[in-house]
Structure formats: structure tokens, C-alpha cells
Image (tube, grey):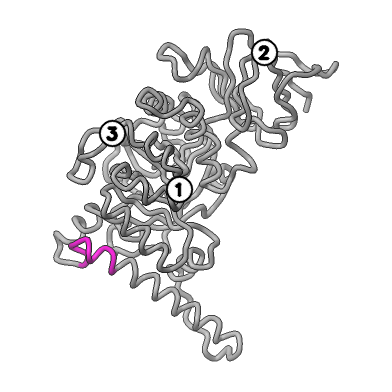
């Protein structure tokens, strides 16, 4: 494929300082160079004078293609609400690539997203990181699985408690999560014993095999927790089992910012521009992301689409910036930090040599209210504009 040279733009590589009137070279779907230098003689030159170029946004937590916005039950595929523990289910098996949420994502400059099951269950299933363009989900995958969804707080206790089932309390939430992890640990012992004596091989259990990926450190446990006490419980259980984890939403995180900061916790904050939809989101604030970042947390700003429309992820980041988060941190929170949290920073999140040519041409700085997404490229191919 011929080299394309995008010249004269204001580049935000994210991994290093901005570059005025820079050159972005793209070939074979990859970034070849971003900076100041010579344009290859045989390159196709595209002049972006007056434009701003950033890496495609990475949304670390959304339900695009998995959870309907207006279809109702026919597209309600986010929660397998028949059992509080369903680690065997996988988000990729429900993703509908033709869903309008993907085109919405592209229109807002979001090129990579982690699709996650909902929070109705204590353990909701495996997540996947995918690109926001494609007709077959298998061709969109960047990492699968990228995590195991867990949830504490109101959602699981409300869903099952109203039917007289466990969990119906926060104590029950924690107990169900612990029990599942202990069961997986016991299953691992049986598998190890079977290596010496095949006659002891246990029956295949897809759910326990999924949880073993967490216990073995292959994927993190990504724990939905809004309220401060739920956040602390999530950390307590993760440390009890020595597993990698991230806190999803972390709405009340400012209350325990020092606690999280000491652990350099990975926190996926949002939806920040949301109403106080339930008791545990009472302390929702646009200042939370900045407070957590200053405390030492690794902060990603998320849409939680459809609860905050994914096409307005830049608006959420801009509002966090307007409420105390430094510009550099806010931009990083929708690009490189989520890429690192999701384990895909070798491919996306910054304008660096060798990474996928996923970039967005803006009419101005994305935090300026009048700025618009002019063009979006995924793998060097224009998908919007």
C-alpha cells in the first residue's frame, strides 16, 4: 500500500508532547512516523492545515452492540439474569456489529471499545476489546477475553433479592463472589491432581475455567462498584485472592481516593455526565476523575454507553478537564491509559510507530465546544467523514 503523509496538522501523540505542523505517515494500516521530518518522495500527501489529529479514543467500558437502546427485550443481551454467577458467558457471542451504536462511536472519534456484560450478576461473564467498525465481530477483535465482569452494590442484590434468592444484601454479594473464586481455586487443585492421575480429571466446567483465567492472572476481574464501601470490598476481595482488578464506575471514588491511590488502582470512571439514577450514585461528580488521578490512580474516562452516549465521550473528558483534571490527563484518560488498562497499548492509544493507524482528524481541539470530528481512520481506512 502506498504511504500516505498527513501534513501540517497539530498532532497529539499522547505518549509525548504535542507537535505543531507535524507529519503523520501511514502505510499498510500502521503508523510509520509522527513528528517533524521529511515526506517520502513517493507518498500521497494530504494537507491538514488548521486541523488537529489525535489517536482514536479508547472506551474502556461500554455495552455497544450488546445492549439495545430502543429495541427492548429482543436486543437485551447484556445480562444473563438466570443465575448470579455466569462466568461462562462471553460478550462476543451477543455483539451485533450492525447496531447503530458503532456508527455513533465512530462519529465521536471512538475507534476501540471494551464491550462488557451488564452488572445484574455478581459475575457477569467475559469482556472483549474490539474495533468499532466491521461486519463480523471476530474480525473486529483486538483482545478476547480482556477481563471478567463482576458487580457489587445495588444491581445484583436488587435483581435476585426481589425473588428471595441470594444475594439480597451487600454481605451476600461479597459472599457469592468469594464462593465462586474459592470454587475455582478448588477446581484448579483438581486439574493439577489429574495431571498425576488422569482418573481424577473433573468434568469440564466452562464457568470455572473462565474464573481460572482470573486466578492465573491471564485476565483481570473488572468489578462494577459505585459506592465507597463497595469499592473497598472489591479491593479487599481482589487482594485476598491476589488477582489483578479494575474498578468500574468508581462514582464515589473521591471518598476513598487515598486508599485507591496507594494501590495505583486502575479505575474506569463514568458515566460522569449522568443523573443520580440510584442511591449509590448520589455523589456523582465531574471532579472525581481528577481527584483520583491526583491521588495516583490510573484513570480512564468511560461512556458506559448507552447510559452516556458514546459519541459524546470527548464531552465527558472535556467536562472532567473543566472540573480540575489537567488537560494532559484528561486526553490520556480516553486514549493511552484505557489502552494500557485493557492490555492493548501495543496496538492503540497513541500515535506511535508500529501501532494501528487509528486516528481522528478534528476541526480543533476536542475540548473546544465548537470542534467537530472531521474524519476517522481505523487501520488507515477512512470510516467516517
Q: Quarter of the image for the N terminus: give it.
A: top right
- The quadrant in which residue 380 appears is top right
Contact between marks 3 and 2 (CB within 8 A): the answer is no
Q: Label 1 crowding class (10 Å Cα cut-off): few <14, some 14-19, many 20+?
A: many
Q: Which residue is mark 3?
A: 285
Question: Can the viewer see residue 90?
Answer: no
Q: Secondary structure at mark 1?
A: strand
* Front-most of residues 1 and 127: 127
Q: Position of residue 176 (x, y in %)?
A: 29, 68
Q: Quarter of the image for the C terminus: give it.
A: top right
Q: Main secondary structure of the magenta part?
A: helix
**Which residue occupies 58% across, 12% down?**
51
Q: Position of residue 135 (x, y in %)?
A: 54, 38
Q: Which residue is mark 2?
A: 21
Q: Over which residues does the magenta segment extend?
A: 166-175
Q: Is residue 203 above or below residue 117?
A: below
Q: What's the distance in space between the residues labelled 3 and 2, CA to CA?
A: 36 Å
* Front-most of residues 178 and 356: 178
Q: Secondary structure at mark 2?
A: strand
* Front-most of residues 28 and 119: 119
Q: Position of residue 353 (x, y in %)?
A: 72, 33
Q: Secondary structure at mark 3?
A: loop
Contact between marks 2 and 1 (CB within 8 A): the answer is no
Q: Is residue 345 above or below residue 186?
A: above
Q: Which residue is mark 1?
A: 266
Q: Is residue 189 above or below residue 9?
A: below
- The quadrant in which residue 183 appears is bottom left
Q: Position of residue 238 (x, y in %)?
A: 41, 62
**Which residue occupies 39% across, 50% down?**
260
Amino acid at each position: 500500500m502506498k504511504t500516505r503523509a498527513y501534513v501540517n496538522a497539530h498532532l497529539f501523540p499522547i505518549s509525548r508532547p504535542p507537535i505543531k505542523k507535524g507529519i503523520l505517515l501511514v502505510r499498510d494500516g500502521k503508523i510509520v512516523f509522527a513528528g517533524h521530518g521529511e515526506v517520502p518522495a513517493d507518498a500521497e500527501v494530504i494537507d491538514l492545515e488548521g486541523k488537529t489529529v489525535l489517536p482514536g479514543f479508547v472506551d474502556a467500558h461500554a455495552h455497544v452492540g450488546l445492549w439495545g437502546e430502543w429495541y427492548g427485550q429482543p436486543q437485551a443481551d447484556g445480562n444473563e439474569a438466570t443465575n448470579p454467577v455466569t462466568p461462562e458467558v462471553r460478550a462476543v457471542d451477543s455483539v451485533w456489529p450492525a447496531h447503530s451504536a458503532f456508527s455513533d462511536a465512530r462519529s465521536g472519534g471512538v475507534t476501540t471499545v471494551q464491550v462488557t456484560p451488564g452488572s445484574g450478576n455478581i459475575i457477569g461473564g467475559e469482556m472483549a476489546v474490539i474495533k468499532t467498525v466491521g461486519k463480523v465481530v471476530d474480525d473486529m477483535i483486538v483482545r478476547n477475553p480482556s477481563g471478567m465482569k463482576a458487580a457489587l452494590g445495588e444491581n445484583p442484590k436488587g435483581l435476585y433479592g426481589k425473588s428471595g434468592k441470594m444475594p439480597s444484601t451487600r454481605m451476600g454479594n461479597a459472599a457469592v463472589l468469594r464462593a465462586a473464586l474459592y470454587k475455582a481455586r478448588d477446581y484448579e487443585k483438581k486439574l493439577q491432581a489429574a495431571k498425576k492421575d488422569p482418573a481424577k480429571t473433573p468434568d469440564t466446567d466452562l464457568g470455572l475455567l473462565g474464573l481460572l483465567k482470573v486466578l492465573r492472572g491471564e485476565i483481570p476481574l473488572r468489578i462494577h462498584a459505585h459506592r465507597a464501601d463497595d469499592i473497598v470490598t472489591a479491593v479487599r476481595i481482589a487482594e485476598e485472592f491476589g488477582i489483578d482488578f479494575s474498578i468500574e464506575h468508581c462514582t464515589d471514588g473521591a471518598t476513598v481516593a487515598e486508599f485507591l491511590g496507594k494501590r495505583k488502582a486502575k479505575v474506569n470512571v463514568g458515566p460522569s455526565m449522568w443523573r443520580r439514577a440510584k442511591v449509590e450514585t448520589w455523589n456523582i461528580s465531574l471532579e472525581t476523575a481528577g481527584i483520583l488521578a491526583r491521588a495516583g490512580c490510573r484513570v480512564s474516562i468511560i461512556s458506559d454507553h448507552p447510559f452516556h452516549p458514546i459519541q459524546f465521550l470527548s464531552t465527558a473528558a472535556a467536562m472532567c478537564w473543566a472540573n480540575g483534571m489537567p488537560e494532559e490527563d484528561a486526553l490520556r484518560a480516553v486514549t493511552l491509559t484505557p489502552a494500557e488498562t485493557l492490555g492493548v497499548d501495543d496496538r492503540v492509544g497513541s500515535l506511535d510507530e508500529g501501532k494501528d493507524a487509528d486516528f481522528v482528524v478534528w476541526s480543533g481541539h476536542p475540548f473546544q465546544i465548537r470542534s467537530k470530528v472531521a474524519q476517522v481512520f481505523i487501520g488507515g481506512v477512512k470510516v467516517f467523514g
